[in-house]
Image (spheres, rainbow, N blue to C red):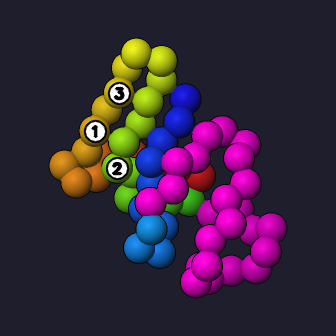
Amino acid sequence: MYAIVEIAGQQFKVAKDQKVFVHRLEGEEGDSVSFDKVLLTGDGDNITVGAPAIEGALVG
C-alpha cells in the first residue's frame, strides 16, 4: 500500500515503514509524525483519490 500526502506544501509518495526527509517540519530528527492531508491511496488495483484530500485518512 502507498499514499500520496501533502507535507509542508509538497507532495510525497510514501509507503509503510518508509523514512521521508522533509524541510520545514517542526520536531526533532527521528520523531514519528502523522499527516492528515492524504491526497491518494493505492493498494494493488484499488486506488482512492481525494477531492482534494481523503476525509478521515491519516498516515503516520
Judge whether residue 23 is colored magenta: yes
Q: In percent of the image, x 48 and y 42: which residue is there?
A: 3
Amino acid type at mark 1: Val
**C-alpha span from label 2 to label 1:** 6 Å
The reply to whether the C-beta atoms of the residues labelled 3 and 1 are less than 8 Å apart is yes
- Looking at the image, residue 18 lies above or below residue 11: above
- Looking at the image, residue 48 lies above or below residue 26: above
List x then y, in percent, for residue 25. Answer: 59, 79
Residue nearest the observer in this picture, 30 or 6 = 6
> Which residue does the numbered mark 1 point to in the structure image?
49
Amino acid type at mark 2: Leu
List x then y, in percent, for residue 14. Answer: 58, 46
> Which residue does the numbered mark 2 point to in the structure image?
39
**C-alpha span from label 3 to label 1:** 7 Å
Callout 2: few (<14), some (14-19), or many (20+) C-alpha neighbours within 10 Å? many
| Residue 47 image label | 3
List x then y, in percent, for residue 51. Answer: 19, 49
Find numbered disc 3 in the image and state the secondary structure of the residue it sits on: strand
In the image, farthest residue toward the right? 30
Find numbered disc 1 in the image and state the secondary structure of the residue it sits on: strand
Q: Which residues are magenta?
A: 11-33
Judge whether residue 32 is colored magenta: yes
